[in-house]
Amino acid sequence: MVCTAGPQDRPFEEQHSRTSVAVVVNGTFQYQTSTGRELMMPGTLLLGNAGDAFTCRHEHGKGDRCVAFSYSDAFRERVVSSAGISLSRFRTPRLAPIRKLSSLVARASELLNGGETGASEELGILALVQAIQIENRDALRKNKVEPSSLARVTRVIRMIENDPDLPHDLAGLSQIARLSPYHFVRVFDRITGTTPYQYLLRMRLCRVAVRLRTEPARILDIALDCGFGDVSNFNRVFRAEFGVSPRLYRVKAWRSPAPNNRR
């Protein structure tokens, strides 16, 4: 799904015809449905219930790209039953960009560069399973956020996405948001579900993962290009995020049937 709407476009109401899960890969927007209103950003999962109306607003920036999946009621029920979970509807509009979703987000980002139908179908199943499991486990967090705080955090997120090579320390990011470092961390976490450092690290690791799956460049060069200056620290955080070393991640990816991975 590619959206080109911006602040000048008037939002309009749409409807989920089936249960939906979308992986946000680029951009930001505000998503409102029966379960609430949340800021969507790279790394989040948008959740939609069949029959629910929804509205997307792009008040602070233009455009976004998502990899979206929809599921019949019968299929969703089979997944819920196999997971041993009692869940008839999603109870929250999104899942925050957490570590458990990192591999899914990286694979969704790769799909935007082309991929086989089988790969997208597999990813769609994994997206629904993880959405059900994570939402069932985590306590819902209802946030009341001031519009000014939402605008400040959205501006920072878009800057991180559009200028990934710039140094993004806490002092610099909080200055862009025009908030004190303490207040910025607190507001950022309340809106996004993660801290500024965790979010920035997760986005850098996602870029590394996509390039490992699609490029033959040296792992060290990719890590340096994506903002990691300490190789040992990079290997440690990558393994913590994806469960394997960068080298093993690449080996497993290049053994897959995706066209871009055949060598």
Image: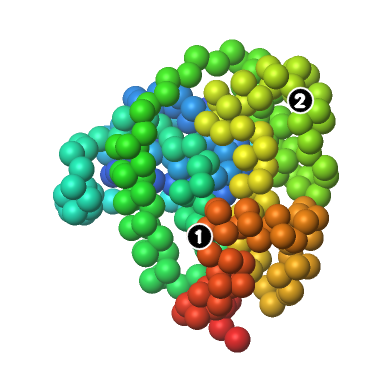
**Which residue reaches farthest bottom?**
263
Q: Residues within 10 Å of mark 1 (few under 14, many from 20)?
A: some
- Left/right placement of residue 130 relative to residue 78 reads right
**Residue depicted at x 76% and y 31%:** 170
**Residue depicted at x 37% and y 64%:** 122
Q: Which mark is residue 243?
A: 1
Q: Which mark is residue 11?
A: none
Q: Residues within 10 Å of mark 2 (few under 14, many from 20)?
A: many
* Nearest the eye: 201 or 26: 201
Q: Are marks 2 and 1 in contact (CB under 8 Å)?
A: no
Real-space CA distance between mark 2 and mark 1, rounded to the nearest whole angstrom: 31 Å
Secondary structure at badge 2 equals helix
* Nearest the eye: 124 or 10: 124
Q: Amino acid at mark 1?
A: Gly
**Residue depicted at x 36% and y 33%:** 138
Q: Position of residue 248 (x, y in %)?
A: 56, 72
* Nearest the eye: 257 or 167: 167
Viewer-nearest of discs 2 and 1: 1
* Nearest the eye: 177 or 234: 234
**From the viewer's perspective, is residue 218 above or below residue 54?**
below
Q: Which residue matches tag 2? A: 174
Q: Position of residue 224 (x, y in %)?
A: 79, 60
- Left/right placement of residue 82 relative to residue 150 reads left
Secondary structure at badge 1 equals loop
Q: Is residue 109 visible?
A: no
- Left/right placement of residue 7 relative to residue 57 reads right
Q: Amino acid at mark 2?
A: Ser
**From the viewer's perspective, is residue 82 above or below residue 211?**
above
**Residue depicted at x 75% and y 68%:** 220
**From the viewer's perspective, is residue 50 above or below residue 7?**
below
